[in-house]
Amino acid sequence: MTSIVHADMELTIARLQYDGGGDWYNDTSVIPNLCEEINKRTTINAAEDQVIVSLKNNSILNYPITYMTGHGNVSFTDEEITMLRQYLRNGGFLYVDDDYGLDTSFRRELTRIFPNKELKELPATFPLYDCFYTFENGVPKIHEHDGKRPQAFGLFDDFGRLVILYTFETNISDGWASPEIHKDPAHIRELAFKMGINIVYYVLTQ
């Protein structure tokens, strides 16, 4: 399938560094590997180097897509909450992939970012699942974790734009890691890459 996106500038996906004790830095190969697949399969020009951003300054404002993951606690200061809110309101997008253990603290911090909004589970008919590759049953299951069904949640701004995507009980980004890390079979990694490409494509075209 050929993408209709023709980027004049190189797309860089940033990784969010945060405090609280969670391992925000784990699996350093995921963004480079995803971007390599994006470049192979689409006309999007994606930088294959990982860029790390912090909410302690305004560096996040330079990147349209930011990725966040981890197994443990996440904690933002009031100033960081303000910066992340500004980023999302100004057109930025945050993809959060629970790596098993992030859920409670992320949801807590989310209520501080947008007190009057809440995550909504995305139905299988949501256009994210059919914008490049087709996922008839919604978000795929990549890692078992608790064996619960995989879920994808979205938070939308006042204009209906998806500004946060949160995946739970699936761990899509683990499937982007180099094969020797999690030893996922090829068909599982393929599902993860296809879903990752859909996420990026959707964000750039919504």
Image (cartoon, rainbow, N blue to C red):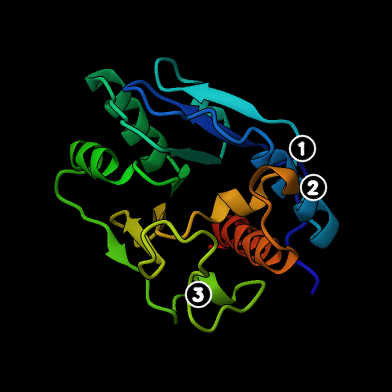
The residue mark sitting in front, 2 or 3, is: 2
Question: Image height check: is 47 above or below 124?
Answer: above
Q: Which residue is mark 1?
A: 48
Report the Cα–Cα distance between label 2 and label 3.
24 Å
The percent position of residue 199, horizontal first and vertical second, equals: 57, 59
Label 3 neighbourhood size at 10 Å, few (<14), some (14-19), many (20+)?
some
Q: Amino acid at mark 2?
A: Glu
**Disc 3 element:** helix
- Mark 3–mark 1 Cα distance, whole angstroms, equals 26 Å
Q: Amino acid at mark 3?
A: Pro
What's the mark number on residue 36? 2
* Residue sitting nearer the eye, 188 or 198: 188
Gap between marks 2 and 1, in whole Å?
A: 6 Å
Which mark sits nearer the N-terminus, 2 or 3? 2
Q: Secondary structure at mark 2?
A: helix
Q: Nearer the N terminus, badge 3 or badge 1?
A: 1
Marks 2 & 1, CB-CB < 8 Å contact: yes
- What is the residue that sits farthest to the left in this orientation? 116
Left or right: residue 51 versus residue 157 is right
Disc 3 target residue: 127
Q: Amino acid at mark 1?
A: Glu
- The image shows residue 190, relative to residue 98, as above or below, that is below
CB under 8 Å between discs 3 and 1? no
Q: Are marks 2 and 3 in contact (CB under 8 Å)?
A: no
Choose between 58 and 31: the one closer to the eye. 31
Going 54% across and 56% down the picture, which residue do you hit?
Answer: 172
Where is residue 84 shown, x and y percent of the image?
A: 36, 32
